[in-house]
Image: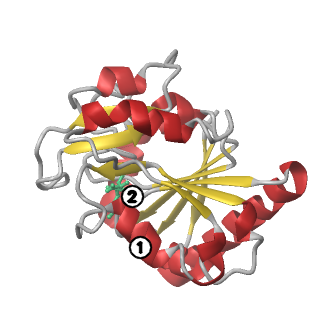
Amino acid sequence: MAATEFFYTNRPEMVAALVEEIAGLLNEAIAARGQASFLVSGGSSPQAVYDALAERQLDWSKVIVALVDERWVPSDHSASNEDFISRHLLRGPAADATFLTMKTDALNAAEGLTECEARYAALPSHADVCLLGMGGDGHTASLFPHAEGLAAAMAQDSEMRCAVIEAKPSEVTGSHTERMTLTRRYIAAARKRLLLIAGTEKQEVYHLAKACEDSNAMPVSAVLATEIDVYWAP
Ligand SMILES: O=C(O)[C@H](O)[C@@H](O)[C@H](O)[C@H](O)COP(=O)(O)O
């Protein structure tokens, strides 16, 4: 299995193509199974995708949007992915979607895992669309290199959909090292995985990750070994 590359000369063209693919996949899922499940990443790259997708006239009442990962911060915190998705995707027509979030009232992610996993039990075994990003350190979702909790999150026989990560502090993590994330196995179980990366630095990291055989050092490499559509623009 491998990556199918969709490389563009500019970001607007890439965003338009990715929005078309996601909208098509969600419509197909609704037509085939009566509902669609859309796993969404945070970060900055997908913002334009969410802003455009929010305006699409889909039957959003039949779409479940669920976070791929979350920083363990209050939902009104500037670093909250829940807040980011609410502001950029769940507005206009898309406000009718159901939203599964990860942050609970628990003091820490470890104590929040049981409730988070119970929430995510509402999703099908195979989510329809999973939109991923990638950091310059080779992480995806919140599967960070050599992180505490990474072995459990990456276990190929895990029955869990969610996992707790304590990332090693870096320029990429900033101060938000305590995370909740989808497991590698639940990401791999999605019917369609999409990776959105932008810029020449990330293109170099992507090529390194494709060749990397140590998924602890570059967790995104495990996802690149599955069928995945990779969207890139400079
Ligand atoms: O919580 C997060 O930060 C994201 O889910 C994370 O995995 C993101 O996709 C990458 O860090 C890329 O982020 P950028 O798109 O901002 O480079």
Q: Which of 212 and 190 is in front in this view?
A: 190
Residue 150 in the image, given as x and y percentages of width and height: 30, 27
As drawn, the residue found furthest toward the front would be 105
Residue 89 x, y percent position in the rendering: 52, 73
Q: How many numbered discs sit on the rendered protein?
A: 2
Q: In this view, does 105 lie above or below 42?
A: above
- Residue under the image location 39 percent in, 58 percent down: 203
Q: Which amino acid does label 2 sit on?
A: Gln
Q: In this view, does 206 lie to the left or right of 15?
A: left
How crowded pointer 1 is (Cα within 10 Å; few <14, some 14-19, many 20+) is rated as some
* Residue 29 tag number: none
Separation of disc 1 and disc 2 at Cα? 8 Å
SS label for mark 1: loop
Q: In this view, does 128 lie above or below 55?
A: above
Q: What residue type is labelled 1?
A: Pro
Ligand 1 is located in which of the four quadrants?
bottom left
Quadrant holding the C terminus: bottom left
- Report crowding for label 2: few under 14, some 14 to 19, many 20 or more residues within 10 A (C-alpha): some
Q: Is residue 230 above or below residue 190?
A: below
Name the residue carrying label 1: 234
Q: In this view, does 16 lie to the left or right of 200?
A: right
Residue identifier under label 2: 203
Residue 51 percent location from the top left of the image:
52, 80
Q: In the picture, which quadrant includes the N terminus?
A: top right
On screen, residue 6 versus residue 183, left or right, reads right
Q: In this view, does 171 lie above or below 15?
A: above
